[in-house]
Structures are given as C-alpha cells and as structure tokens.
Image: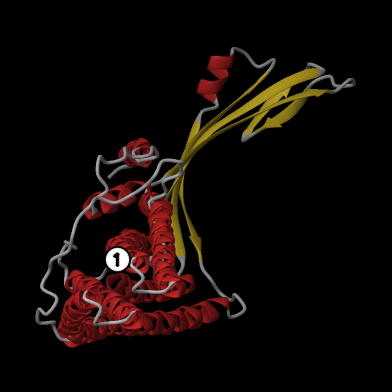
Amino acid sequence: MNITQAIIAAALLLPAQIQAADTLQTTVAAKPASWTLRSCIDYAKQNNVTVRKNKVNAQSARLDLANAKAGRLPSVSASTSQQGSYAPFRKTSAVVNGSQVMSTGSKWTYSGNYGLEASMPVFDGGTTKNNIKLAEINTQIADLTADASMLTIEEQITNLYVQILYAKETVNEDEEQIKLSETNLARTQEFYRNGLLAQADVSQIESQLATDRYQKVADETTLNQYRLQLKQLLEINDDENFDIATTSIDGDVLAMLPATSQVYNTALALRPEIQAGKLAMQKSDLDVKIAKAAWYPTVRLNAGLNATNMSGNGNLMTQLKQNWNNFVGVSVSIPIYDGGKTKNNIAKARLEKQSYYLDLLETQKSLWNTIDTYRMNAYNAQQRYVAAKENANYARTSYELTSEQYRLGLKNILELTTGKTNLATANQKMLQAKYTELLNAAMLKYYMGDTINL
C-alpha cells in the first residue's frame, strides 16, 4: 500500500465507525400485549439500563479497535504561517524566509510559509500489532460481558416471575380458606340460633375468618412487591397496573435431576463470563509484549513538501513554484535508559496475569457454587414435595371428615379450626416445595444451555 492509498483508507474508516455507533438503539421498545416470561425477557433485552450500558461499552470497544488499526496508517498534516514585519531604517537587505534567502528594499514585508507532511510508522517493536490484537480481545470481552449481563437479568426475571406465580397461587389458596371459614361461620351461627353453641364459639370462628382475611392481605402485599420488583427490573416507569400473564406450571416435580458436575462441565463451555475470564489471560500476555516493546527502537518514514513567498519578490504563484521543495527522510528513536520504567511495566503486566487467573478461578468457583445450590435446592424440594403432598391429602381428608362430624355435632370448634389450620399449612408447604423445585430445576437446564420454558 502506497501513502496515497493509505490516506484514503484512513479517511474511509471514520464514517463507517460513526455509522456503527449511530445504530445503537436508544428508544424504548413497545410493551407486549401479554407479559409472558419470554416477552418479559425480550423487553428487558431492549430496555434494561445495565444491558443497554454494556451494549454501549461493546460499541465503544469496536471504536477502540478501529483506532488501533488506524495506527498502521500514515498521519498527514498541513501547516501554514503568515508573518508581517516593519523595518523603518531598511534600505536593501537579504531576508531569510523558510529555507529561502530573499532580498527586499521595502520597509514593510509580508511572508508566507506553506507545508504538507506525512509520517508513517515502519517499526515499533510490535506495539501497533499487539495493540490491535489487544483491542480485538477487548471487543470480544465487551461482547461477552454484555451477554453475561443479559443472562443475569434473564435469571433474575425468571426468579421473580416464578415468585409471582407462587404468590398468586398462595392468594388463591387464601381465598379457599376464607370460603371454608365463611361456610363454618354460617354453620356455627345456625347452631347458635338453635341454642346448640354459645356466642364464644361463634366469636372463635369469626376470629378464624378474620385471620384468614388478614393472611390474604399479607400474601397480596407480597405478590405486589414481587410485581413491583419485576416492573423495576424491566425499567417500566409508569402508573399502569402491571401483572404477568395468567399461567400455571404443571411440570414434573419429581423428574430426575442432572448431577452438579454434569451441569458445571457444560456451563464451563457456554457461560460468557468464563470465556471472558480466559480472554483476559490472553490479554495479559499481550500487555507483557507491549511493555517489552519499549526496549526496541522505533522507525518512522517522513515525507512532505513546502513552499514560501515574500512581498516584493514577484507574483505569488511564481514564487510558490520557484520556492517549492520536497523532502523525504527516516527518523529513528533508540531507547537507552528510562529509569527502569519498562522493567517495572513488564513486571506489573505479569502480576496482572496472575490477577486475571485468580479472577477466573473465582468465577469458576462461583459458577460451581451457584449450580450446586440450584441442584441441592431442587433435590430438597422434591423430597419436601413428596412428604407435603401426602400430608396435604391426609389433611384434606381429615378436615372433610371433621367438618362433617362438626355438622352432626360430633366434633367441637377447636377440632374444626385445628383441622382447617392443618389443611392450610399442608397446602402451603406443598405449593412452596412445588415452585421451589420447578424454579431450581429450570435453572439447571438453563445453565446447560436450554431456553427457560415454564
């Protein structure tokens, strides 16, 4: 590539990069008709501030890469200087203008100097080449960081989405308990009117009904808190009521779970944070090479042209033509002593490699702990679900028998309310175990590369 071609290539790079930067999405995406799990995730990809910020960082890394590649190209600059002078006692004298010696007899003189210079790197110890490689790695790391942030957001959205589903089903269970208490209250009031029970018995059932209603309000508050957290995560800032699509999870709670090591080994090859950590170690190797390049000489090729003119010496264009000259040269800079800075920079770059290695180990450890926690939570939830489901069946059968016996006058208020409380507790434990298992099992599949599907 000659100098002219290189200059044209450099000029063409800038608008391409500016156009790439201008393509970054800055408007808010339209809200979906229904907030399913997938629509929540898709909306967050376009609107979550953390995700958008990492996209900006990735775009910035691409511009850094373009700048690094531009280091191979020549730099071109134009210059001019204009000067006027007054010599009140001058008769005829020789005046030096740039590289030209001119004569003038005027007291007022005006001179101009015009130049165009180009400089191209020839050898820099591999600094430019390694800076390009470094910028390429930084671009990949920025992309992986953006991907990792999206995976984190996706995980958080799924967690909140399942919590909302669980809270909704809890509220439905509260409504069932309220209906049971209302039925018991009506029956107890009838017994009271017939003189079979005292007012204290009616008050006890009323107290139970009030407790059930309070529990429903408390669970609705929890549900609204989860809705608010999801709304904030999606960056929705308005006064509209927000709720997810009505759906039910009927997955196999007792499905076989993959081993932690199986999920972990798969995740090591898929998770972007692991890939970014490995690239960071490659980046540190380049940092060492760039630091060592300070020991090498640098060579640049310089070329240019200049022309001068001066008042009183004829036509401007004629002067510029006659005074026109070109030059070409080579400049060499040889490092001799820098007070040990290069040596220290190399040592620091090697220490950074150790730091990146430890960061990678920490990321891998965190990944294992996360997967192991999901697996343990899913396994424990399966065990609780089996016991809770059996307990819930017994509790419902027991309560139905107790309720019937109470209607016949064979059971008292205490036995009825105790049976109802046991039923509510058993149902709640079963729901909790069910949703805990389904969430954690879904996360295990997610870390193995599957799309979250509830």
What's under tag 1, amino acid-wise? Arg
Of all residues, the one furthest to the top in this rendering is 315
Q: Quadrant of residue 89?
A: top right
Query: 104 or 370: which is nearer to us?
Result: 370
Residue at 22% of width from left, 78% of height from top? 399
Residue at 59% of width from left, 12% of height from top? 315
Query: 236 or 402: which is nearer to us?
Result: 402
Q: Which residue is mark 1?
A: 187
Whole-percent x and y of residue 410? 24, 82
Instruction: Answer left or right for 337 relative to 242.
Output: right
The answer, for residue 225, to whether it is visible in the render is yes
Whole-percent x and y of residue 305? 49, 35
Residue at 35% of width from left, 62% of height from top? 149
Query: 138 or 126: which is nearer to us?
Result: 138
Relative to 365, say whether 181 is above or below.
above
Q: Quadrant of the N terminus?
A: top left
Of all residues, the one furthest to the right in this rendering is 89
The answer, for residue 137, to whether it is visible in the render is no
Q: Secondary structure at mark 1?
A: helix
Whole-percent x and y of residue 280? 36, 73
